[in-house]
Image (spheres, rainbow, N blue to C red):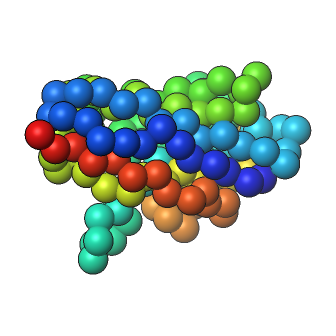
Amino acid sequence: VQLQASGGGLVQPGGSLRLSCAGSGSSTFDNYAVGWFRQTPGQDRDWVAAVSRAGSRTDYAESVKGRFTISRDDAKNTVYLQMNDLQPEDTAVYFCAAVYVLGGFDLVGADDDFYVYWGQGTQVTVSS
């Protein structure tokens, strides 16, 4: 599967953005668990949120709980990351990643190694 992340931009503190991760090249996108990560220059890539196949389970990093929401629309082969109350520390390049999950398990992953497919990043800048 190929992943295309989009929706980044410049927003003021307290503002909102919705990122999209569009999957292509697979007719079974609903069988993929998807995660969002972010990275700032010189830093390791940090996990942000994840959604299981079919959307039955979600998980979030503590730093974004209550502000970010991950969801998926498998009819559109797309996973979203709704980001509210953005703060300057949320500034980063955001990446989406996916892995095919066999057997119907509702797995979510917070480690890079869990995922096989990665999209290019989309820049999010929070600044006044």
Work out which residue is located at the far left of the displayed protein and give it: 128
User: Is 32 rendered above or below residue 82?
Assistant: below
Residue in the image at 55% along x and 36% along y: 20
Nearer to the camera, 124 or 69 = 124
Above or below for 42 versus 110: below
Residue in view at x 66 percent, y 60 percent: 117
Q: Quadrant of the C terminus?
A: top left
Give the x, y percent position of residue 106. 62, 36
Question: Can you give x and y, in whole percent of width and height, for residue 68 in the image?
Answer: 33, 31
Observer able to see residue 13? yes
Report the front residue among 30 and 128.
128
Which residue lies at the image location 30% right of the left edge and 41% below the top edge? 10
Measured from the top left, where is residue 121 in percent x and y? 49, 57
Q: Residue at position x 27%, y 48% from top?
A: 125
In the picture as drawn, the residue positioned furthest to the right comes out as 27
The image quarter in which residue 126 lies: top left
Please identify the quarter of the rendering in which residue 52 is found. Answer: top right
Left or right of residue 5, residue 32 in this image: right
Q: Point out residue 113 in the picture as x, y percentages from the top left corner.
A: 54, 67
Count the labels in the image. 0
Drawn side of residue 49 relative to residue 88, left or right: right
Give the answer, above or below, for where 69 lies relative to 2: above
Whether residue 62 is visible to the viewer of this picture, yes or no, is no
